[in-house]
Image (cartoon, helix red, strand yellow):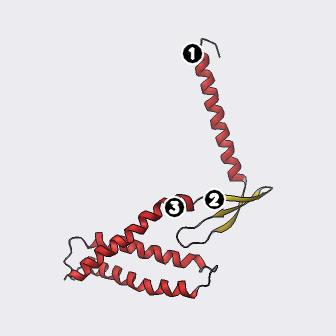
Amino acid sequence: MSDSLRYKIVLWMVWVQIALLPIIIVMINVTNSGVMWRWNLINNLLVVGYILGLLALPVSRGLEKPKLLKWWLRIDFWFSLIPAVIALPLLFYCGRHFIVAEDGDYVLYEERGIMMAAPHYGLGKKERERKLAEMETEKKKKEEEATIAKWKRRHGMSQ
């Protein structure tokens, strides 16, 4: 075993991850259905646990460690990697905004969360969407004008 700082960091990562498990389990069991912890705390703790599981093995490379720790890190890495790979495609779906209602200059939108995050609603100004639509229209108009100019040049017509 080693007394290096890196070895101590790896041990702390493992212990923090082990300590997070009962905390998350208790929080899930205490929460009623339809109720969510503020700042989506359960989700954030789960993400921290997964990140610790993914980082502990690479950080411990080249260190002298007991067999139990070595196997723990390997198993933990794979149990953290599998949900991460499954969740990555969901990030695209979960980070999108869906417009629910519009009223004048304001829009009510829904944003879905990842993992155990509940969907939430937000109120925004339509101005951003309007600017994006205007930029898109301008871009299409410029492309159209460029296409017409090319066509005229090919066919010998003057501009």
Tell me the number on the disc at residue 14: none
Q: Give the image location of residue 88, x and y in percent.
A: 46, 61
Residue at 38 percent of width and 68 percent of height:
81
| In-image side of 87 versus 152 (left or right) | left
| In-image side of 157 versus 53 (left or right) | right
Residue at 66 percent of width and 37 percent of height:
138
Q: Give the image location of residue 99, x and y in percent.
A: 69, 58
**Residue carrying label 3:** 91
- Residue at the limit of the structure toward the top, as seen here: 156
Residue at mark 3 to residue at mark 1: CA–CA distance: 46 Å
Residue at mark 2 to residue at mark 3: CA–CA distance: 12 Å
Mark 1 or mark 2, earlier in chain: 2
Q: Nearer the viewer, residue 48 or 24?
A: 24
**Residue carrying label 1:** 154
Q: Quadrant of the N terminus?
A: bottom left
Tell me the number on the disc at residue 97: 2
Residue at mark 1 to residue at mark 2: CA–CA distance: 44 Å
Mark 2 or mark 3, earlier in chain: 3
